[in-house]
Image: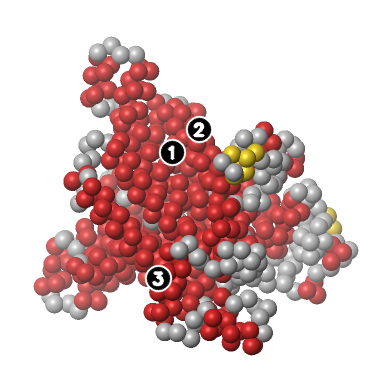
Amino acid sequence: MSATVLPRREETPFRRFVAEFSSNWLAVGGLVVVVIVALLAVAAPWIAPQNPYDLAQLDIMDGRLAPGAKSADGLTFWLGTDDQGRDMLSGIIYGLRISLGVGVGSALIAGVIGSALGLAAAYFGGRIETAIMRLVDLQLSFPAILVALMILAVLGKGVLNVMLAITLVEWARYARTARGAALVERRREYIEAAECLALPRWRLLFRHLLPNCMPPLIVIGTIQIARAITLEATLSFLGLGVPITEPSLGLLIANGYQYMLSGKYWISFYPGIALLVTIVAINLVGDHLRDVLNPRLKR
Amino acid sequence: MTSWLLRRLIQALFVVLAMTVIVFIGVNVIGDPVEILISPQADQAERARAVIALGLDRPLWEQYARFLWGALHGDLGKSFVFNEPALRLILQRMPATMELAVTAVLLSIVLGIPLGLYAGLRPNGIPGRLIMAGSIFGFSLPTFWVGLMLIMVFAVQLGWLPSTGRGQTAMMFGVPWSFLTRDGLAHMLMPATNLALGNIALVLRLTRAGVRENMHMDYVKFARAKGLTPARVLFVHVMKNILIPIVTVVGLEFGSIIAFAVVTESVFAWPGMGKLIIDSINVLDRPVIVAYLMMIVFLFIAINLIVDLLYTVLDPRVRLESRE
């Protein structure tokens, strides 16, 4: 394999993977940012200077202060405040929570459903395969934003409906990927061996076939999380996403939009930067994962 | 050829039919049809009358048949807000969206192909690498955020371009168009660029990949050996081969540009179909929503069909008969 692996240490697939992944500093940087963002989102209540949902802590007199301004009781608003007098920094940290939660949650659910259907299509073939893949083709011939709009137009707003919409948008790509990987894997000897052992079908599918189809699914999953976060932000910006009581980054940006024209840029700008950094970092990691996990690209 | 076209048309017809079923079920079964189809301002007695008038007391298949019959006659209900036929409302807004989408496609070709050619011919130079790195941003940045930044920089800070609206329009074929006036063009520049960004990146990458792949082919070596100028080799011989995938993708992406116009139109307050659908969803003007969805489905299927046809015309290697 590559010369980056030290000869003395025992070479395991995981070590090889780590060594190859860390050869690209841009991707490692992306991973560091992703970890920091995730930690911020998880630890929001302990890190944020202010609880942006606690009305008792807000003072309308602090509304639309520029970055760096101080409130009456000495709190510094490093990134300014919005029209309600909320600290933007706290708003962003709490917003990350919603954005990441919705994005990661729906991408994972879509991943489970899509991969299961894709595996089933590849393994059983015949009518089941035709039916599932026709559905995938139909789904993928319409752009994500349109399908999500359709679903939200029928179901209405709300966190759960947004998650449902994103899941319904994203499952097809997983299904296509899983089927592609499984079609290759199911002709391998170990599947034949498992079939000869008369293992139950679920065991064959999920314990033997699925683990060997994981690499492409992990790559797709990373990119799909970034897509889910973008889609959620877009829907919330359009006013069709999460409710005002649980503002995600997209909704924060939408709130600041009306003040942008009067030069109060920070209400939209900083949540946008947070969103951007998150998405770009995830994409960098995903892009490099694809290079590392794809055996065809190996020299 | 004719039998292939016929088969494709029948296929398309079935997809349209399937989509009418999905939209119908979405609006009439999952959502509450009384709430959706009858104005929320109506009182009890009005409601009961409307239920009978709309045939909501009939069996489901009969309701669907009525819906389909109406759709075939261009009747998709009346907007609650504008009190006008929903389909007419959408058709009125369509030219604004179309001129924005067409401009965006033109922009992505005019900018994407030269940038891609350059990056493909000199893949290791610094400008080539910068172009590729920039294209990643074109893919991953959220459209609405880029739009906001464009407004912030060019409208608010620099004051060069107007931020919202269509500007002055001029009439052609009885329809107002922005691209015919200077003011309209100035209004169109930012939204069209915003809409085109993702596609510029896509066209650029396709062109670059095509150039890199084709430059090593035997036919290029042969053309060079014949003593043709590098420009002729690139623009006549190589171009012919890389244009095929580009045309396909640009054609197919036209549909998603129209879909993404929903976002751009909301950011720049561009009065097109996309803005109309968002406003309609926000006030629950469901007949307009249904009409928009049907319209878009129809548009998409038409685009797919046209791209398929174009593909076979452009690439003589693809014989229609072999595409069973």
The C terminus of chain A sits in image quarter: top left
Q: Name the residue under label 1.
A: B203
Q: What residue type is labelled 1?
A: Val
Query: In the shown orientation, is residue A21 left or right of residue B264?
Result: left
Whether callout 1 and callout 3 share a subunit is answered yes
Q: Which amino acid does label 2 sit on?
A: Leu
Chain letter of disc 2? B
The reply to whether callout 1 and callout 2 are in contact (CB within 8 Å) is yes
- What residue do we see at 59% from left, 39% from top? B172
Look at mark 2 in the image and give the residue it sits on: B111
Residue at 53% across / 60% down in the picture? B87
Q: Which of marks 1 and 3 is nearer the N terminus?
A: 3
Query: Which colouring convention does the figure follow?
Result: secondary structure
Of the residues under marks 1 and 2, which one precedes in the sequence? 2
Secondary element at tag 1: helix
Instruction: Identify which residue, B170 or A211, lies in the foreground.
Output: B170
Mark 3 or mark 2: name the one nearer the start of the chain.
3
Q: Residues within 10 Å of mark 3 (few under 14, many from 20)?
A: some
- Under circle 2, the secondary element is helix
Quadrant where the N terminus of chain A sits is: top left
